[in-house]
Image (tube, rainbow, N blue to C red):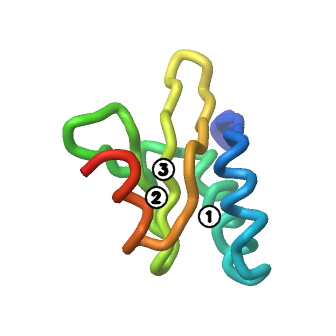
Amino acid sequence: MSKISWKIELSEEAFRDLSNLDLTISKRVIDKLEKSAKDPKHFFKRLKGCDDYKLKVGDYRILALLLHEKKIIFVEKVGHRRNIYKEKHI
C-alpha cells in the first residue's frame, strides 16, 4: 500500500492560468502535480525568502504552498518561468 496522497487545491488565479495554457502543457502540469501529491517534499523546492515552493514542468513553474498539517498542496500560480516570479517574489 502506498503513502496517503496529499490533496491538491487550486487558487482562482492558478485555475485561470491552467485554462489559458496550451492543452498539452496543461496536461503535463496536471500530471506532474498528481505525481507530486504522493511525496511533495521530493518534487517541490522551497523559494528563498518566502513560504512558497516551486515545481518545475519543462519551461513552466507551479508556485504553491505546502500545508503540511492538512496535507494540502495549495497551487497559487502556474506560468512560464520567465514570467512567473516577476509579480510575486523578486
Graded by Cα atoms within 10 Å as few (under 14), some (14 to 19) or many (20 or more), the crowding at tag 1 reads: some
Find numbered disc 1 in the image and state the secondary structure of the residue it sits on: helix
- Give left or right: position of 50 versus 75: left
The CA distance from mark 1 to mark 2 is 9 Å
Count the numbered circles shown: 3
Give the farthest residue toward the front. Answer: 87
- Give left or right: position of 42 versus 30: left
- Which amino acid, mark 2? Leu
Q: Residue at x 49, y 33 (%)?
A: 66
Q: Is residue 39 above or below residue 20?
A: above
Label 3 or label 2, whichever comes before in sequence order: 2
**Residue position for label 3:** 63
Counting from the top left corner in percent of width and height, residue 11 is at 67, 39
- Give left or right: position of 3 versus 45: right
- Which amino acid, mark 1? Lys
- Which amino acid, mark 3? Leu
Q: Is residue 54 above or below residue 69?
A: below
Label 1 or label 2, whichever comes before in sequence order: 1
Which is nearer the eye, 42 or 8? Answer: 8
Label 3 or label 1, whichever comes before in sequence order: 1
Q: Residue at x 72, y 42 (%)?
A: 12
Mark 3, mark 2: which one is toward the viewer?
Answer: 3
Find numbered disc 2 in the image and state the secondary structure of the residue it sits on: strand
Q: Residue at x 65, y 51 (%)?
A: 14
Q: Residue at x 53, y 45 (%)?
A: 39
**Residue position for label 1:** 32
Query: Toward which corner of the image does residue 30 lie, by quadrant?
Result: bottom right
Graded by Cα atoms within 10 Å as few (under 14), some (14 to 19) or many (20 or more), the crowding at tag 3 reads: many
The CA distance from mark 3 to mark 2 is 7 Å
Query: Toward which corner of the image does residue 5 lie, by quadrant?
Result: top right
**Residue position for label 2:** 55
Find numbered disc 3 in the image and state the secondary structure of the residue it sits on: strand
